[in-house]
Amino acid sequence: MDLNNFLYSGFKFSAEEDLLKFKFKMLNSVFIIVAFFSALFGLLSDLGINDIGPIHSKVNYIYSFLTIMLIFFLRSSKENYTLTVHSLLIISLLTFTSALIFVPQDEFRMIWFYLLIFVAYMVSGRTSGMFYTLTSIAIILATNYFIDLQLSNIAINSGILGLLIGSFLSNVYTNKISNYEESLRKQNSSLSLLASTDYLTGVMNRRMFNEISAHYFQTAQKNELHLTLLLLDLDHFKKVNDTYGHQAGDQILKHFVKILEGILNKSDILAGIGGEEFAILLSQTNSDEAYILAERIRKKIENDFIKYNGEEIFVTTSIGISENRKSDTEFENIFSRADMALYQAKNEGRNRTCHADDTLSSPHASAHRFILDYSI
């Protein structure tokens, strides 16, 4: 097992889990340090080199053993992270309390509580950090009240003040990291949204549609489900832009999308795939059902208009439909048939809906459509 594999508990982390990845690395680093040095302190005490007493020596061995157990527990699931952290903090608190009580010869034993607080903030966050700060202070005060810790009041007060200062600084640092993480998450979310949507209409773009449609296609073919594609193109849109300007064209596209969103179900996939052309992917819907929906869309567009500079601008849409077939090997098969059906709808006069099964069988139909449509 290499070191990185160990530090990440054998897990893979996505880009969105970057902070969690760091926390796993830090937690496993703490495990290594704790397991090694707690066992070492117990061994040195048993050898008479660094006496910490028979009771606390055994506590250190137990501390080391439980830490190793937590390493394996964490490796079983990412979901175990929170429970593992709190288990470590609790057994650490008990171990350091043992040192406070059973190792009176160590005048600096309160320093272990500083490490506890720092680790709590680092691997668990502000709430845990503040909790273990107050708990550590309460343990020190209560223990000193009932047991003679052989520490002066100045040492106790200085130790508590140091814990408060350390907690405050750790809190400030942790808060800054948390704010930075949230800001970075929002920026990544915004960038992801921009990369997957059309900047003008806000609908899914061609790149994202290709990814999703491929997934839907595989699911539909595997489970023998209906999957139907509608390709829609606004008729004579170039003429609209030339006559009224591109701002009017932009308003028409936005209005067109708004109409579609008002008709489609939430489960339907709507995407802008280029200029005035859009795609609608309908899962578990056959071509006959899709035709009814397409006609509803077409008639709604036909009878609607936008007002621009005091003029009413009407547009129509042509629609091509294709359903998946058992012989299809990729989504492109469905797309090509829908594209040919759209070509036929435009070739027959536009403002109409055509099934792929009704299209011309010419192998040059799709290419012919490209030349015809984009030259008008």
Image (cartoon, grey):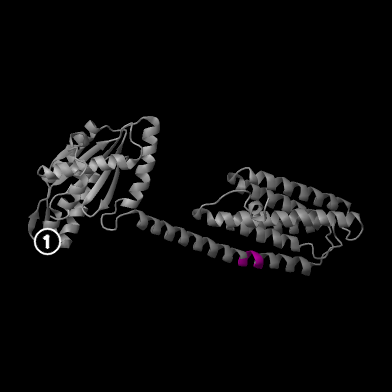
Task: Please say if 323 is above or below 246.
Answer: above
Is 214 inside the magenta-drawn segment?
no
Question: Looking at this rendering, what residue extends furthest in the front direction?
Answer: 363
Task: Please say if 316 is above or below 182.
Answer: above
Q: Which residue is mark 1?
A: 242
Answer with left or right where residue 104 lies relative to residue 361: right
Looking at the picture, tell me which residue is in the foreground, 368 or 39. 368
Question: Looking at this rendering, what residue extends furthest in the left direction?
Answer: 311
Question: Looking at this rendering, what residue extends furthest in the top direction?
Answer: 224
Looking at the picture, tell me which residue is in the foreground, 209 or 267. 209
Q: Which residues are magenta?
A: 165-169
Q: Position of residue 324 (x, y in %)?
A: 30, 35
Looking at the picture, tell me which residue is in the foreground, 367 or 126. 367
Q: Position of residue 167 (x, y in %)?
A: 64, 64
Q: Amino acid at mark 1?
A: Asp
Q: Position of residue 102 (x, y in %)?
A: 84, 55
Answer with left or right where residue 125 lies relative to residue 180: right
At label 1, counting other C-alpha atoms closer than 10 Å, the crowd grade (few under 14, some 14-19, many 20 or more) is: few
Q: Position of residue 159 (x, y in %)?
A: 73, 66
Residue 131 visible within the image: no
Q: Which residue occupies 17% across, 38% down?
A: 360
Q: Main secondary structure of the magenta part?
A: helix
- Image quarter of residue 143: bottom right
Q: Which residue occupies 15% across, 54% down?
A: 237
- Image quarter of residue 285: top left
Q: Which residue occupies 17% across, 58% down?
A: 249
